[in-house]
Image (cartoon, helix red, strand yellow):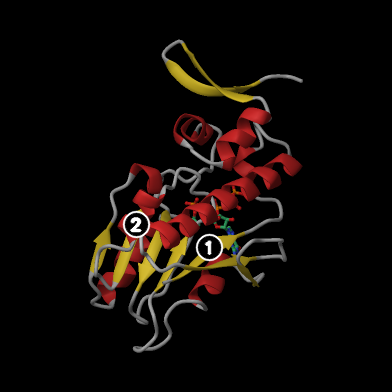
Amino acid sequence: MRVVVPFAPERPKTRLAPVLGEAERAAFARAMLGDVLSVLSTLDRERAVSVDPLVLSTAPIDCEVSVAVDDRPLTSAVNDRLPASGGDDPVAVVMADLALATPEALARLFGPDADVVVAPGRGGGTNALVVRDPAFRVDYHGASVRDHRRIARDADLSLAHVDSFRLAADVDEPADLVEVLLHGEGEAPAWLAEAGVSVVAADGRVDVERSSG
Ligand SMILES: Nc1nc2c(ncn2[C@@H]2O[C@H](COP(=O)(O)OP(=O)(O)OP(=O)(O)O)[C@@H](O)[C@H]2O)c(=O)[nH]1
Ligand SMILES: C[C@H](OP(=O)(O)O)C(=O)O
């Protein structure tokens, strides 16, 4: 299946500014993209899920897989890559900030035979999708999972959900780094550890702290 991975390499992950500087956020975003692509490659190699990845980037990047540069807003760029007519192959959309994704978790996205399969993100987003019907279009940002349900319902499409901790955990806020450090398995947790970011549990709260120097 064609798997589109949207990626915005310029000034990414602004909500992580309390913990990471601008160049660090760019490097960390790239590490997360590397983890997602590595999971897709493992799926293809080891799980007999045919995966044809395409990074849909707002600017040129060096990458181990094909890259399409499209600097339009996320929704327009993704919609241009979805099935356009009845005979077209299905398309998956997997966000580049799913640092907890594993081959097992992502394989579940490809399981249901529905017109649209949605993996909701915490906080109302849509972290991954499979689209099999050209009547479906995305509308990202805001409570996009609610919008995507409505769009599928209005077009009379069958809709399946993937209930997955790992696919729900996109990395937006500093608190999300706790999950990356505790449960991540790839480049992203290693990058954070190298940068001196660690998990701290104090006064009944679990958070991240950063060593100075
Ligand atoms: N192609 C493309 N990808 C985007 C765009 N905006 C965000 N993305 C990607 O979409 C996914 C979700 O992005 P967000 O978490 O909403 O945005 P972000 O820019 O990474 O982070 P914030 O600055 O904190 O909002 C990430 O994989 C981004 O790299 C865009 O305009 N075009
Ligand atoms: C793209 C956006 O991501 P979030 O801002 O929820 O991370 C969404 O899923 O609609």
- Mark 1, residue position: 5
Q: With respect to residue 22, does 145 lie above or below?
A: below
Q: With respect to residue 118, does 69 lie above or below?
A: below
Q: What residue type is labelled 2?
A: Ala
Q: Callout 2: few (<14), some (14-19), or many (20+) C-alpha neighbours within 10 Å?
A: some
Q: Does the residue labelled 2 lie within 8 Å of ligand 1?
A: no
For the residue pair 150 and 89, the one nearer the viewer reads as 89
Q: Which of marks 1 and 2 is nearer the N terminus?
A: 1
Q: Is mark 1 within 8 Å of ligand 1?
A: yes
- Mark 2, residue position: 107
How far apart are the two marked residues, 1 and 2, measured between alpha carbons? 16 Å
Is residue 23 in view from this perspective?
yes
Element type at mark 2: helix
Is residue 122 in view from this perspective?
no
Q: Where is residue 186 in the image (x, y as percent from the top left)?
A: 53, 41
Q: Residue drawn 52% across and 43% down?
A: 171
Mark 2 and mark 1 in contact (Cβ < 8 Å)?
no
Q: Position of residue 66 (x, y in %)?
A: 61, 70
Q: Quadrant of residue 108?
A: bottom left
Q: What residue type is labelled 1?
A: Val
Element type at mark 1: strand
Q: Residue drawn 50% across and 67% down?
A: 4
Q: Quadrant of residue 1?
A: bottom left
In the picture as drawn, the residue positioned furthest to the front comes out as: 46
Q: Position of residue 111 (x, y in %)?
A: 27, 62
